[in-house]
Image: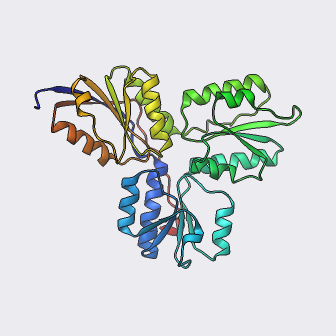
Amino acid sequence: MKNKELKILLSAPRGFCAGVERAIEIVEKSIQKYGAPVYVRHEIVHNKYVVDDLKKKGAVFVEELEEIENKTRPVIFSAHGVPKQIPLDATNYNMTYVDATCPLVSKVHREAENLNKAGYHIILIGHKNHPEVIGTMGQLPAGSIHLIQNEDEAKNYKINKDKKIAFVTQTTLSIDDTKEIINILKNRFPNIREPLKEDICYATTNRQMAVKNIAKKCDMFFVIGSRNSSNSVRLVEVAKKSGCTNSQLIHSKSIIPYEEIKNSNTIGISSGASAPEILVENFIHNLKNRFTVTINEVEIIKENVIFKVPKKLN
């Protein structure tokens, strides 16, 4: 059975980014400091394995603060960020809270607030109902920020001509798709103000570029990550657009398509920014049980970004 040879191109960088590592560390250090249970509003990061692991350690995940019966226990806000009202609600409940919002998401929040104060109407390029988008839109008064999800919405967006407008973006979007939306907006509104520095984060960019680099050499491409992970889903799209039409997301409920893999000579593997490396290792282990595997890691850039946890946890 194992005589079929299979070449794996392992995309790098992949997996955990600095914001995800910081968020997980915040939950673990909070449990150490305050004891269990520690509550977490929303999934700390979009990965079932990570969430289940933290549950075992004493984290309890809720959707809203109202669900927390014992409000003397601390609550952590997820890496995706929260609307401005949530910390105010926690304060009104006299709750201790720790904000695990990724610093790069917080940067977008501050950017949007500053633009709003300077009299700009803001366009947010992102995906409706994603927690990060809900958090960013929730930094500003209703009506002062407008969500655009795709090129059609950018083409049809209407606003009073004498209004100053600016745009910010969700941090985990496809670089190429976002570029198209931005080009449409710039053509329609030549004076639109753009962020001083790219909002799509370094980790999203690096992982997409690494996938682009190898996808065209692969018969199949697999991204390890959760279905609700925006950056993981984007990686699958990037692999398809970059020349590997048979690209798939491998999530907790996935069945590995061994028959399809059997007909491939080279496969690519990457993982989303919230997927731990053990899931990649497990996937490769399963392949090694069936095929004679050679692995070639293709790294396009070294990452050395570290975000510190809040001082109160040290």
Q: Quadrant of residue 301?
A: top left
Q: Is residue 131 left or right of residue 8?
A: right
Q: Could you tell me which quadrant the N terminus lies in?
A: top left
Q: Is residue 254 visible?
A: yes
Q: Is residue 43 left or right of residue 167?
A: left
* Residue 307 x %, y %: 50, 52
Q: Residue furthest right?
A: 162
For this rendering, which residue is in front, 26 or 93?
A: 93
Task: Classify 57 as above or below 8.
Answer: below
What residue is at 39 percent from the left and 62 percent from the top?
54
What residue is at 50 percent from the left and 42 percent from the top?
230
For this rendering, which residue is in front, 241 or 35?
A: 241
* Residue 8 x %, y %: 26, 29
Identify the coloring.
Answer: rainbow
What residue is at 47 percent from the left and 71 percent from the top?
38
Task: Classify 263 as above or below 106.
Answer: above
Q: Quadrant of residue 268?
A: top left
What residue is at 25 percent from the left and 29 percent from the top?
261
- Total count of labels: 0
Task: Classify 6 as above or below 171.
Answer: above
Q: Quadrant of residue 303?
A: top left
Q: Is residue 306 visible?
A: no
* Residue 233 x %, y %: 46, 38
Q: Is residue 78 left or right of residue 279?
A: right
* Residue 19 x %, y %: 49, 50
For this rendering, which residue is in front, 112 or 148?
A: 148
